[in-house]
Image (cartoon, helix red, strand yellow):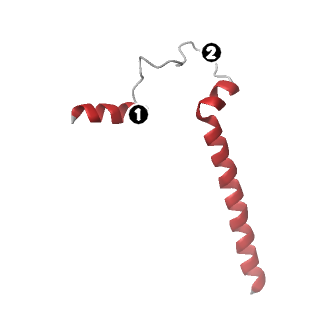
């Protein structure tokens, strides 16, 4: 049971995996390319979808207001 909890904590990002292949050790800023290809694209796409959904919702609200 404890071993499963260790995995859960490790995957949540609260601990550092000492055996990771590409972890950043130096204090240099992370490049956009490094960030983008290691999960940043998911964040980027999420922001695009949220902005698009917000626009669709606002358009829908205005269409309801226009009907009344």
Is 38 situated left or right of 59 in this image?
left
Q: Is residue 35 above or below residue 44?
A: above
Q: Residue at left 59%, top 34%?
A: 39
Picture layout, residue 30 above or below residue 46:
above
Task: Pick out the residue farthest to the top.
Answer: 26
Q: Position of residue 66 (x, y in %)?
A: 78, 81
User: Which is more N-terminal, label 2 or label 1?
Assistant: 1
Q: Toward the viewer: 21 or 15?
A: 21
User: Crowding at label 2, few (<14), some or many (≥20) Cα neighbours within 10 Å?
Assistant: few
> How far apart in space, not on screen, are marks 1 and 2 (Cα)?
24 Å
State the SS at label 2. Answer: loop
Taking the spot 28% from the left edge, 35% from the top edge, the residue there is 5
Residue at disc 1, secondary structure:
helix
| Residue 47 image position (x, y, % from top left) | 66, 48
Q: Residue at x 63, y 48 (%)?
A: 46
Classify residue 14 as left or right of residue 53.
left
Where does the N terminus fall, quadrant-wise?
top left
Image point 76% across, 77% down: which residue?
Answer: 63
Q: Residues within 10 Å of mark 1 (few under 14, many from 20)?
A: few
> Which picture quadrant has residue 8?
top left
> Are the residues at dot 1 and dot 2 in contact (C-beta closer than 8 Å)?
no
Where on the picture, by quarter, is residue 43? top right
- For marks 1 and 2, give the one nearer the viewer: 1
- Residue 30 is situated, as x and y percent measured from the top left of the image, at 63, 22
Residue 60's label in the rendered image is none
| Towards the viewer: 35 or 27 | 35
User: How many marks can you see?
Assistant: 2
Question: Which residue is outermost to the bottom?
Answer: 68
**Percent from the top left, x then y, of residue 17?**
41, 22
Report the disc number at residue 11: 1
The disc placed on residue 28 is 2
């Amino acid at each position: 049971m404890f071993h499963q909890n260790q995995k859960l904590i490790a995957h949540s990002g609260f601990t550092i995996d000492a055996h990771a292949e590409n972890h950043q050790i130096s204090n240099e800023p992370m490049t956009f390319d490094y960030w983008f290809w290691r999960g940043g694209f998911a964040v980027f796409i999420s922001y695009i979808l949220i902005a698009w959904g917000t626009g669709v919702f606002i358009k829908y609200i205005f269409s309801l207001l226009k009907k009344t």
